[in-house]
Image: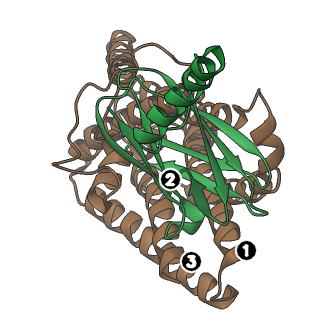
Amino acid sequence: MIRLHSVLARTVPIMLALAAGPVVAEDAAGTVVVTLKGHHFFPDTVTVPAGQKLTLVFDNQDPTPEEIESHDLKIEKVVAAQKSIRISVGPLKAGEYRFVGEYHEDMAKGVLVVR
Amino acid sequence: MLAALIIVFREVLEAGLILGIVLAATQGVPGRMRWIGLGLMAGVGGALALAAVADTLSDAMAGSGQELFNAGVLLVAVSMLAWHTIWISGHGGRTLAAEMRGFGRAVAHGHRPLSALTVVVGTAVLREGAEVVLFLSGIAAGSEEGDGALILGGICGLMLGFGAAGVLYAGLIRLPTRHLFYAINLLLTLLAAGMAAQAVAFLSQAGIATIGAEVLWDTSGVLRDNSVIGRTLHVLVGYTDRPTLLQVIVYCLTAAAILIGAHHARLSHREVPV
């Protein structure tokens, strides 16, 4: 009985989180991590709460640099190959905020969904 | 090739508009092309050097090196623009050329405002040029097209951008001299205010400026600031479609400080017997 309870306690939140969509777990400070690999963002859709300051971390695992740019978020920053950068955004109103990797704009596309 | 053309055009447009205003402000000043040319070359050299050390800069300042550098360069330009506008207002309120004709040691006296404007041109070319170099090397690394197409696109973008500068310059110098002076002073003031607001955006991105981060209004439905017209207005008057509270405050304070400083300088000038 006790084991089933603890198993459920662990798996139910995970199942709920998966059901909620492509959400990246945030730590208490509101950090979102996006990986860049093969000139694509992983995840390419991130859901975050509105009205909060956030830190976006872009981890570039490609062998070439990329410029992270978002006209909606008003950010632009170059991330060197095999490096990661932090970008402060927010507080954001509800909506969808598109961001791109400017050097490979047809492939590196992502959306920050603010609810 | 199109991607290279568009990105080079966008960046050169911004520097080109600033160049157009400075050319209009220095029209008729002897030796101005040497100064402006110096600013252009220093900007290009700086942009290449900056692109070469981009990695180191990025890691500097706890990862905020890029934002601090961009904000710093912008604020240097703001102070140069403020100084120039206030200086010229305190010296008879005429265009720089007319001002220099009025002095016996015309060339020597004109060096300071000319050097200030040289720094403004240089910093603009530095900022935009670094973007161009970084972007072209970024897309060159993964492009199937080959360097020839990129270079061609880049040159076309360069020509279009300079074309826009020429249009602005030609439009400005058509104005009668009296109006030209006020138009240029206003443009330089708004240019400075817009740059200050842009510096705020970089500091906010770095998590350094944390107050006043709420977006005040959203006019992206009316005019997106990354369209051609939007970018032109962005450079000329500091237009942004989603300004934060802090940006609006800094914009107004910068414009007010320069206008008040210029007004005060004009008044002081009148009190001194000629």
Q: Where is residue B218 in the image (x, y as percent from the top left)?
A: 23, 36
Residue under the point 35% across and 61% down: B169
Does residue A74 appear in this view? Answer: no
Using the numbered discs, state the Cα–Cα distance from disc 2 to disc 1 in whole angstroms: 23 Å
> Mark 3 or 1 closer to N-term?
1
Q: What residue type is labelled 3?
A: Gly
Task: Judge by depth and name the residue closer to the eye, B235 or B60.
Answer: B60
Task: Judge by depth and name the residue closer to the eye, A5 or B131.
Answer: A5
As drawn, B152 above or below A63: below
For label 2, the SS is: loop
Q: Return the mark for residue B154.
A: 3
Q: Mark 1 points at which residue?
A: B141
Find residue B57 and report its image quarter.
Answer: top right
Find residue B71 and report its image quarter.
Answer: top right
Using the numbered discs, state the Cα–Cα distance from disc 3 to disc 1 in whole angstroms: 15 Å
Task: Judge by depth and name the residue closer to the eye, B78 or B96.
Answer: B78
Q: Which amino acid does label 1 sit on?
A: Ala
Which chain is the one coloured brown? B
Is label 2 or label 1 in front?
A: 2
Q: Name the residue under label 2.
A: A44
